[in-house]
Amino acid sequence: MWISNEQFLGDLGMGAMHLEQGGYTMHSKSFAESIFAERDIRWIVGAHVKQVEAGKVEYELLDSTFHEQSFDFAMLIPPFAGQEMKAFDASGEDITSTIFAPSGYMKVDADYTPKPYAEWSADDWPKKLQNPTYSNMFAVGIAFAPPHQISQPRKSPNDTLITPAPPRTGMPSATMARAVAENIVDMINGVSDTPTRTASMAQMGAACIASTGKDFFTGTAAAMTVYPVVPDYAKFPDTGRDQSLTSGEVGLGAQWIKHTLHHLFIYKAKLKPFWSVIPE
Ligand SMILES: Cc1cc2nc3c(=O)[nH]c(=O)nc-3n(C[C@H](O)[C@H](O)[C@H](O)COP(=O)(O)OP(=O)(O)OC[C@H]3O[C@@H](n4cnc5c(N)ncnc54)[C@H](O)[C@@H]3O)c2cc1C
């Protein structure tokens, strides 16, 4: 049983996707539901987990009804949240709200002006990942404060926010980290006073391969690519994404790629010879 705060399966915190697959376009809802149905996994969506006790989880649905699900074995992925850090300036004044958003993430060069969902734009997303007040502070990956969700936020009549957070998976996190690290090197070496490379999630793609059966000959994996991660309806009015770079496929080949990436990732993390040429 899969319990998720997504409004529908396949939203993935990215407001869903239209995936190119063998010459056809498939909505990520159909893609995800088919994978789950084939593996006999049932799902409950639009759900906010309120409480977990031994053998029992309690959740609220978007219509504010409360339900329970019993389990023998469960895994809970907690909601994204920043570290509970306080910040002080040289005189000891508390500058936590200058550095961090209420969620605990660091504020960077995003447009945090509160706006209705219909006015959200790809341009709201940060490009340099630099704190606007302190130019020597940067945050990448999970650590930066997104300007808003990617999926349309939904609340139950009880005012409980039931919506997935923007995913910041490995590949975008590493792409941001590389751009910011190279910018910091340039700033330290006096090459530039300001960051010259950008890494906006609205201008980068991501690839994700999820194992759906681990066997070298009979296994499968779901491979997905998306460009850009944050939809840009100004550039791509139909779906918000470049359809030639947004795809989904399930198969044995993807399982081999997953296996290969696993070893490449560990190799790179150990900084073995030529690690830096392995892409994020
Ligand atoms: C269950 C799960 C499965 C995932 N699977 C995939 C996948 O298949 N593919 C994929 O691309 N991504 C996957 N991800 C996402 C991926 O792990 C993250 O996107 C990525 O790790 C984010 O990198 P980061 O550097 O921003 O944060 P992290 O990797 O979380 O690094 C933050 C680091 O900061 C340290 N830290 C925290 N607080 C302090 C402190 N006060 N002082 C010092 N250090 C501190 C932490 O210990 C941690 O090492 C998965 C995530 C989860 C939870």
Image (spheres, rainbow, N blue to C red):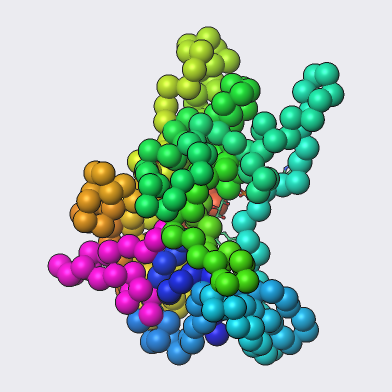
Q: Is residue 223 above or below residue 129?
A: below
The structure residue drawn at horizontal position 26% and vertical position 44%, both measured from the top left corner, is 234
In screen coordinates, is 206 left or right of 271? left
Q: Tell me, yes or no, if residue 247 can be seen here.
A: yes
Res 212 quadrant in image = bottom left
Identify which residue, 220 or 14, lies in the foreground: 14
Q: In this view, does 225 lie above or below 137?
A: below
Q: Is 13 covered by the magenta stretch? A: no
Identify which residue, 186 or 108, lies in the foreground: 108
In screen coordinates, is 225 left or right of 215? left
The structure residue drawn at horizontal position 84% and vertical position 24%, both measured from the top left corner, is 92
Q: Is 21 covered by the magenta stretch? A: yes
| Residue 235 in picture, x, y percent from top left | 24, 44
Res 36 quadrant in image = bottom left
| Residue 110 in picture, x, y percent from top left | 49, 36
Q: In this view, does 187 lie above or below 67?
A: above
| Residue 214 in picture, x, y percent from top left | 47, 75
Screen quadrant of the C terminus: top left
Q: From which residue to which does the magenta span run?
A: 14-33
The structure residue drawn at horizontal position 64% and vertical position 41%, both measured from the top left corner, is 101
